[in-house]
Amino acid sequence: MHLYQSREENLNKTASFSFIARIKSFRYAFAGIAVLIKTQHNARIHLIATTLVIGGGLFFQINYIEWCLIILAIMAVWVSEALNTAIEFLCDIASPAPHPLIKKSKDLAAGAVLISAAGAMIIGLIVFMPYFH
Ligand SMILES: Nc1ncnc2c1ncn2[C@@H]1O[C@H](COP(=O)(O)OP(=O)(O)OP(=O)(O)O)[C@@H](O)[C@H]1O
């Protein structure tokens, strides 16, 4: 059986619900996360930062709202990094040769990661600073 469905197969999909198909799509999603960690150096930095922040949260016993803020911040960084990586792969296949629009596209995607990482750092400071007083 082919790993990827053809465009035709996707167009002809019926609306019937299948648990096997749902489990498969989870498998693909986890494969995507594995690609992210294996291929992106930034993702390894996010992994270290995520571990430190969760460790800090457990150590300082931050409250319910603080956990929600930290989880949102972690999520924003991972989601933006995953989308940035997906855009990079698409750009590389769409135009391996230099192109001004590919530059804009990749720079924008990188900008999104920077915005989320900066926001996460500010949230981290706001949450953890009081515990150091
Ligand atoms: N085909 C291209 N055409 C024009 N500019 C490009 C092209 N490929 C890369 N660039 C430029 O080089 C930069 C780095 O691109 P690259 O694909 O190497 O990303 P990267 O270094 O892996 O980024 P990240 O650190 O976010 O993973 C882009 O942001 C863009 O400015």
Image (cartoon, rainbow, N blue to C red):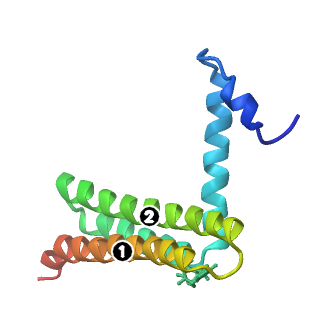
Could you tell me which residue is drawn at 77 percent across and 42 percent down? 4
Q: Which residue is drawn at 51% across and 67% down?
A: 84
**Above-or-below relation of 18 to 82:** above
Q: Label 2 CB, ligand 1: below 8 Å?
A: no
Quadrant assignment, res 90: bottom right
Residue 7 image position (x, y, % from top left): 72, 37
Give the SS element for disc 1. Answer: helix
Q: In which quarter of the image is the N terminus?
A: top right
Structural crowding at the residue carrying mark 2, measured as other residues with C-alpha within 10 Å and reported as few (<14), some (14–19) or many (≥20)? many
Where residue 2 appears, as percent x and y from the top left, is 86, 38
Residues at circles 2 and 1 in contact by the CB criterion of under 8 Å = yes
In the image, residue 65 sits, relative to residue 89, either above or below, namely above
Q: For the residue marked with disc 2, what is the amino acid?
A: Ser
Tag 2 secondary structure:
helix
Q: Is residue 85 left or right of residue 110?
A: right
Ligand 1 occupies quarter: bottom right
Q: Position of residue 73 (x, y in %)?
A: 31, 63
| Residue for badge 2 | 80
Q: Which of 30 and 12 is in front in this view?
A: 12
| Of pointers 2 and 1, the one earlier in the residue sequence | 2
Q: Looking at the image, which residue sits at the far front?
A: 100
Q: Which of 75 and 81 is in front in this view?
A: 81
Q: Residue 117 carries which label?
A: 1
Q: If the image is split into quadrants, where does the C terminus sit? A: bottom left
Select label 2 or label 1 by which is in front: 2
